[in-house]
Image: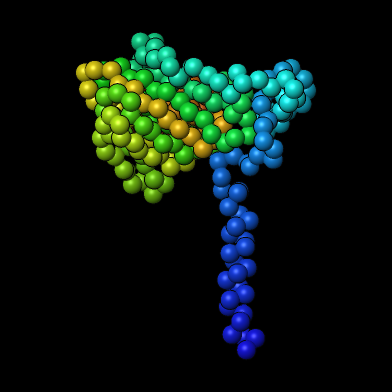
Amino acid sequence: MASKQLPAVLHAAYAVLLALAAPLLAGDPDMLQDLCVADYKSLDGPLRLNGYPCKRPESTTANDFFSDVLSVPGNTGGNPSGSAVTAANVDKVPGLNTLGVSMSRVDYAPWGVNPPHTHPRASELLFVLEGYLDVGFFTSSGKFFARTVCRGEMFVFPRGLVHFQRNNNGAPAAAISAFNSQLPGTQKLAEALYTASPPVPTDVLARALDVNDCMVEPCVI
């Protein structure tokens, strides 16, 4: 009888382990109180945390949870790729601290591109406000998922995977992105490879891209 009950006990144990592990898979740690408005002044001191310390409750106001930053279109003219990202994360909205969510607005010039990049700490849900976008992402096995997303439609980019958007149209476009992290982070592939400090060795880039060294850095003749 006891031997028949053993599989059920193991299944229950596995279920408990999965439940305990679930929070570890979330974008951010769970909050431990109702509010923890980011105290930006804490950056002036020596203390550093994974996130921000909390302001004292008596110093918290409604404005800590408000922002109009996404209401203003970004300036796409100053970006050679033809896109502008406006973030509404914990660095801009202190009330987002410990809540595990944030948003961004992306504006696209005609034919503009939000170039290949990743968000290491969050998945992204993209909602198209205006126009239509060609979007896509790549899995770790090299599979490419892509389609056109029109106004009023949405598309999901899984956490940490390389993705992009392109305004394949002669009119401006705009989108709102939602993230399951208060600070999802953004790493653009081209910038990571070519603007790192100190720089990535030329031969490493050449071999990674399967090109001649002189295509990475002009050779002296």
Residue 115, picture quadrant: top left
> In the rendered image of this protein, does residue 137 appear above or below residue 23?
above
> In the rendered image of this protein, does residue 82 appear above or below residue 22?
above
Residue 103, given in percent of the width and then of the height, sits at 48, 28
Query: What residue is rendered at 24% in x and 17% in y?
Result: 171
Residue 58 at least partly seen: yes
Taking depth in this image into account, of 195 and 164 the one nearest to the observer is 164
Query: What residue is rendered at 62% in x and 86% in y?
Result: 3
> In the rendered image of this protein, does residue 29 appear above or below residue 150?
below
Residue 200, given in percent of the width and then of the height, sits at 51, 27
Taking depth in this image into account, of 117 and 155 the one nearest to the observer is 155
Placement of the C terminus among the 4 image quadrants: top left
Residue 113 at least partly seen: no
Query: What residue is rendered at 40% in x and 18% in y?
Result: 84
151 left or right, relative to 141: left
Taking depth in this image into account, of 152 and 83 the one nearest to the observer is 152
118 left or right, relative to 91: left
Q: Residue furthest bottom?
A: 1
Residue 18, given in percent of the width and then of the height, sits at 58, 59
122 left or right, relative to 115: right
Query: What residue is rendered at 61% in x and 21% in y?
Result: 62
2 left or right, relative to 74: right
Residue 20, given in percent of the width and then of the height, sits at 63, 56
